[in-house]
């Protein structure tokens, strides 16, 4: 896994198309309103009755931000009125009142993640209140991972100390770019010194792992400006890095209309920035995990990939492979017992359902056996760049070549381009194919040809 990537620009251009990021399979566009709160309850009951019920992971969505970042495509509510959080915390508590009793009491919470929005829109007292509420509703495992997304501009060093005190051991800092011109163009101004101080505070209190988010493809970025950003990031040496491709979709995401398209780097410039990024990070000792993610070799994510336990879910890559994901808050998505469920993305509807004593689930999907076997293939390829065909056949009681005859034809064409090798024993993604892993996974997506939803570009 530590082999250098083979960055072939001509090959990347050939395969440059839109496609899913596979934080789930089937992907969210396949979710249906036929899946209701009653469906979810049946799935939870089934999961409770498994021979060894899975531990739990909890995702909490805090939708509020007090400023808008123009590139943002998240579900958020922009407001400077911090009084709104008191009502939201009450709604979260009511939602947990309904959710928690559905799960057997001895199923422990191994993982907790606060996402958004800006989770630290909550003040210190509110963060403590929310944690106390979670502790009242769920039984924490002795060893657990607790992570939170942080806007460095909206959190103090004192709050970082508090987060450590109440159990958070992982944080993710939104950086995006250190260049002042780029920051002004996307309305997210934060200095290198500010980020450095927040990172130092996290290390001072013993936060185990720090992630930084960067975005390439933003207005006014160039190879030289992004190289400067990367040099500063490498100097700070976060444990993990997420390097996202900016997808300019102003017709879908209203804030992006404030970005002038003519200020964006050209596709060729974006490719050069990406190649530069890959080379600098690998030279600095970061391991390419896949799908925009890097980590230091000592990080648990690298170890999980080496041991074959890495998974992918709605938060990206995860070291907690075998959990049921419970999700609370407006728009949040969970996954319990081979099903996906999503809460209402409309705050007033979310609120009305909870106040009526109903779970706010509005859509979802129960996986078929075909979905589950294809999900396994996609997860193995996107996390480990390898599929053991013989083990897969034994598990699913099928002949791979017969079941996936059409897919094999597509894979053989990719093999001729050097993206992978395939024989009766295994599919092995090659260094040239690792950056194009989304393309390889798309071969096994049975819904893609019927899907008219616009996805981001794979590179």
Image (cartoon, rainbow, N blue to C red):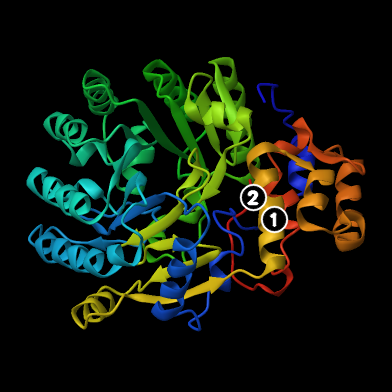
Under circle 1, the secondary element is loop
What number is the disc on residue 398? none
Where does the N terminus fall, quadrant-wise? top right
Asked if residue 52 can be seen in this view, the reply is: yes
| Residue at figure coordinates x 65%, y 21% from the top left | 2
Q: Nearer the viewer, residue 378 or 420?
A: 378
Query: Depth check: 186 or 125 in front?
Result: 125
Q: Quadrant of the C terminus?
A: top right
Q: Residue at 45%, 49% (x, y): give it.
A: 315
In this rendering, the answer to whether 447 lies above or below 282 is below
Q: Are marks 1 and 2 in contact (CB under 8 Å)?
A: yes
Q: How many marks?
A: 2
Q: Quadrant location of residue 272?
A: top right
Q: Is residue 339 above or below residue 12?
A: below
Q: Residue at the spot x=66%, y=70% of the render?
A: 368
- Spot occupied by residue 220 in the image (x, y as percentages of width and height): 45, 40
| In the foreground, 414 or 50 | 50
Task: Give percent across and percent down for residue 137.
Answer: 22, 56
Residue 17 is labelled as: 1
Q: CA distance from mark 1 to mark 2?
A: 6 Å
Residue closest to the far front: 51
First-in-chain label (1 vs 2): 1
- In the image, taking residue 372 as reference, residue 394 lies left or right, namely right
Q: Can you tell which mark lies on residue 458?
A: 2
Residue 390 point in image, percent of width and height: 84, 45
Dot 2: what SS? loop
| Callout 2 crowding tier (Cα within 10 Å): few <14, some 14–19, many ≥20 | many
- Categorize mark 1 by other alpha carbons within 10 Å: few (<14), some (14-19), many (20+): some
As rendered, which of 77 and 403 lies closer to the eye?
Answer: 403
């Amino acid at each position: 896994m530590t082999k250098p990537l083979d960055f072939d620009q001509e090959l990347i251009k050939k395969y440059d198309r839109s496609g899913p990021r596979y934080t789930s399979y089937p992907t969210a566009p396949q979710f249906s309103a036929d899946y209701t709160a009653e469906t979810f309850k049946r799935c939870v009951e089934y999961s409770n009755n498994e021979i060894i019920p899975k531990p739990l992971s909890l995702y909490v969505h805090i939708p509020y931000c007090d400023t808008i970042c123009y590139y943002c495509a998240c579900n958020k509510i922009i407001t400077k009125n911090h009084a709104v959080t008191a009502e939201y915390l009450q709604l979260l508590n009511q939602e947990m009142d309904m959710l928690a009793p559905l799960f057997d009491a001895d199923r422990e919470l191994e993982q907790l993640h606060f996402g958004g929005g800006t989770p630290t829109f909550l003040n210190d007292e509110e963060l403590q209140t929310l944690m106390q509420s979670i502790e009242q509703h769920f039984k924490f495992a002795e060893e657990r991972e607790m992570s939170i997304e942080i806007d460095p501009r909206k959190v103090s060093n004192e709050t970082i100390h508090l987060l450590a005190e109440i159990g958070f051991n992982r944080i993710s800092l939104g950086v995006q770019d250190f260049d002042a011109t780029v920051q002004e163009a996307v309305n997210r101004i934060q200095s290198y010194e500010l980020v450095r101080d927040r990172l130092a505070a996290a290390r001072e209190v013993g936060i185990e792992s720090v992630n930084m988010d960067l975005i390439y493809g933003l207005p006014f970025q160039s190879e030289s400006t992004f190289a400067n950003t990367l040099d500063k990031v490498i100097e700070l040496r976060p444990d993990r890095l997420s390097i996202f491709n900016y997808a300019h979709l102003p017709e879908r995401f209203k804030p992006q209309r404030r970005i002038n398209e003519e200020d964006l780097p050209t596709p060729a410039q974006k490719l050069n920035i990406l190649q530069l990024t890959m080379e600098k990070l690998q030279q600095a000792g970061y391991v390419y995990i896949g799908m925009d993610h890097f980590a230091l070799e000592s990080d648990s994510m690298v170890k999980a990939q080496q041991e074959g336990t890495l998974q992918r879910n709605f938060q990206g890559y995860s070291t907690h492979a075998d959990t049921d994901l419970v999700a609370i808050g407006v728009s949040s998505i969970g996954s319990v017992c081979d099903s996906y469920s999503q809460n209402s993305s409309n705050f007033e509807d979310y609120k009305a359902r909870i106040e009526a004593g109903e779970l706010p689930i509005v859509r979802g999907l129960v996986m078929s056996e075909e979905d589950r076997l294809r999900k396994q293939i996609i997860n193995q390829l996107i996390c480990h760049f390898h599929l053991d065909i013989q083990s897969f056949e034994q598990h699913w009681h099928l002949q791979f070549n017969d079941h996936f005859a059409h897919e094999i034809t597509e894979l053989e064409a990719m093999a001729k381009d050097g993206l992978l090798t395939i024989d009766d024993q295994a599919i092995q993604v090659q260094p040239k194919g690792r950056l194009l892993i989304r393309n390889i996974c798309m071969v096994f997506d049975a819904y893609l040809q019927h899907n008219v939803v616009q996805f981001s570009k794979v590179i």
